[in-house]
Image (tube, rainbow, N blue to C red):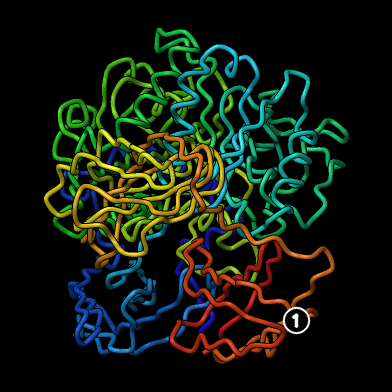
Amino acid sequence: MKEFIYQWHFVNCGNQTNMKRIILLLAVLLITATASDAQIAKTRVVLIQAEVESAPAHIKLSWDNAAGSLGYTVYRKAPGDWTWQEQKALGATDTVFTDTTVHVGQVYEYLVDRQINGAHLYGQIACGIEVEAIHYRGEVFIAVDSALNASIPDALHKFYMNLVGDGWRVNPVVTSANWTVPDLKDTIKAWHLLNPHRHNSLLLLGNIPVPYSGNLNPDAHPDHKGAWPADVFYGEFNYSWTDVGTYTDATRAANINLPGDGKYDQTIIPGELGLQIGRVYLDDLGTLGLGRDSLYTRYLEKDQSFRMNEWNVPRRGLVDDVLNALGGEYPGRNGFQNANAMFGIDGCITSYDTFINILRTEPYLFSHASSTGGFTSNKQLNSTMFKLPTYSVFQTSFGSYHGDWNNSNNLLRAEIAGPGYGLTSVWAGRPQWHFHTMTMGYPIGYSAWLTQNNFIDGNHQTYDPGYGAGWVHVTLMGDPTLRLHMMNPASNLSAQSNSSEDAVTLTWNASSDPEVIGYMVYRSDSLFGIWNQVNTSAVSGNSLTDDHPLPGNNVYMVRALKLEKSAGGSYFNMSQGTFTWVTAKNGDGSITNTVLPENLKIRLYPNPSNGIFIIEMNDFEPHEIEIYDLTSKMIHKQRIAHKTRIDLSAFPGGIYIVRCGDISQKIVLSR
């Protein structure tokens, strides 16, 4: 185990004086930049490539050597763990590390630390071998404003169906015009605490109250120092947020922070967030030339098109960085690190023309543009450009001012509102963002959660931070449930009950994806209810008979399954679901949903442990437990009674959640 001391870009830029010096140097750096050094930030990242094999199980990492390298150290950890474990120290010319201690079905994160000229340069990647499919991703709280709920109900219903079709339960809550930030926070907190592990995501959809907090200016402009929008407030539940400070340096009224004005004092997020948060806010974007309802409807239609793989976007990222070294900060490294981790070296494309010209004609899953900027623009982009289509799905940009997004025609918000492919956007560079887990099927909301929690305190100093890491301004614009790899779904699902109405036969049209290996079938009594798997292994054909349908109404969902191969290895991926309804009045099936006695208590010990736990209950009735990792993936299921031994020694160290009905407890595997 090692405590990381990150390179100059965190240690030396940890105060406003140094950051102001960097900003003052910015104009000179831009003027003197040449074509040969316009993408120099790429040299400040270790670009890792991964190869995996299942028999014998191993993960091979490789990277290019760099002149002046003094050595490399490789670290590994489990997702959700905040501490790296050293695997091996390597020499100055070593460029390969093979990990033979991995297990098929598990995800691992790796960090390679290059020591060079007194500095540390990093690369990170998420890897796995045939990682199991995730059938249930959790529950998303959708705060939708009442006007939007009334004006586009059909578009919202389709969107909710799409979330269900990717394994989410949805909890839409209509907010009224008189709701305050504390009102909404209290509602979200009450929902989250009902089941902290499964109630894990939040989408703010429409004109939802915006929390402000802090005395910060991560863009380092003195006139911009004060409170910034802070959606993280909605996801932090363990600390009191105060409102007693006086911060009046900013020139805009929105950033002035006074005692009792409803803007909080905290600049650093006070505790680990419990939710993956995204916001879709398309009001006040008059420069795009469409009405409010049309902008939201278009966004939701784009969301569906991407999920159904109608666009079939090539797996590549486009990076254009004109800030260069920026006094030693190299903020553009964020684009190169993430594009490489998601798509590999060949899929990390350096911009070769005017950035917007490329995105007008060529589709990319990821893009990054860093330069000087304002509230509605940076050097490569401006909000008006998004009146016309651009073809990047997951967008990142950097430049002054526009990370403060709650203003007219803001660039971050315009990026997801246009007619092209844009579905998410973030202000990336201060701090650095971390999307590497998306290559193993994690949603972008998880990337936001990692980035927001990184460097909030001494126990979360895990990833390359950049200036402003752990601050309240870090925000995801867009749907937090979106994933990187979409696939063609099955279609035309139909259901027919037999003459006795005690069995149902399902048929569907095959996915057009040639790599599909089968289909998973699910059943519920309602679209937004609890879904149970009908089949435990994939159906290879295009039909299935359910001999135990529910008595009465049955809703069925079918999802295609394939072994997805990505820059990080392989995992079993599933398409969006396709649905149908049927009645089987004599069915004898039931919905599996454990109901526990109110006074049931669970004890786990030893905790932490090396993998062997005892779980003890205060009654003698049998109960079913499920154990999840921090990505909501179920890794173990077992029926227990009173006192039972649990063996998790095959799984990597980290934090896991034991769930029995609505009771959840954390367990820690130490290695």
- Residue 453, by quadrant, is bottom right
- Residue 25, by quadrant, is top left
Which of the two residues, 607 or 343, is positioned nearer the viewer here?
A: 607
- Residue 434, by quadrant, is bottom left
* Residue 406, percent from left and from top: 58, 26
Whether residue 55 is visible here, answered yes or no, is yes
* Residue 357, percent from left and from top: 18, 27
How many numbered discs sit on the rendered protein?
A: 1
Residue type, label 1: Phe
| 571 over 561 or under it: above or below | below
Give the farthest residue toward the front: 500
Residue at 52%, 32% in the rendered image: 401
Which of the two residues, 455 or 439, is positioned nearer the viewer here?
A: 439
**197 left or right of 281?**
right
Residue at 50%, 82% in the rendered image: 653
Residue at 55%, 61% in the rendered image: 454
**519 left or right of 75?**
left
The residue carrying mark 1 is 620
Which of the two residues, 557 or 240, is positioned nearer the viewer here?
A: 557
| 452 over 93 or under it: above or below | above
Residue at 65%, 68% in the rendered image: 660
Whether residue 67 is visible here, answered yes or no, is no
Q: How many other residues sit within 10 Å of disc 1, few (<14), some (14-19) or many (≥20)?
A: few
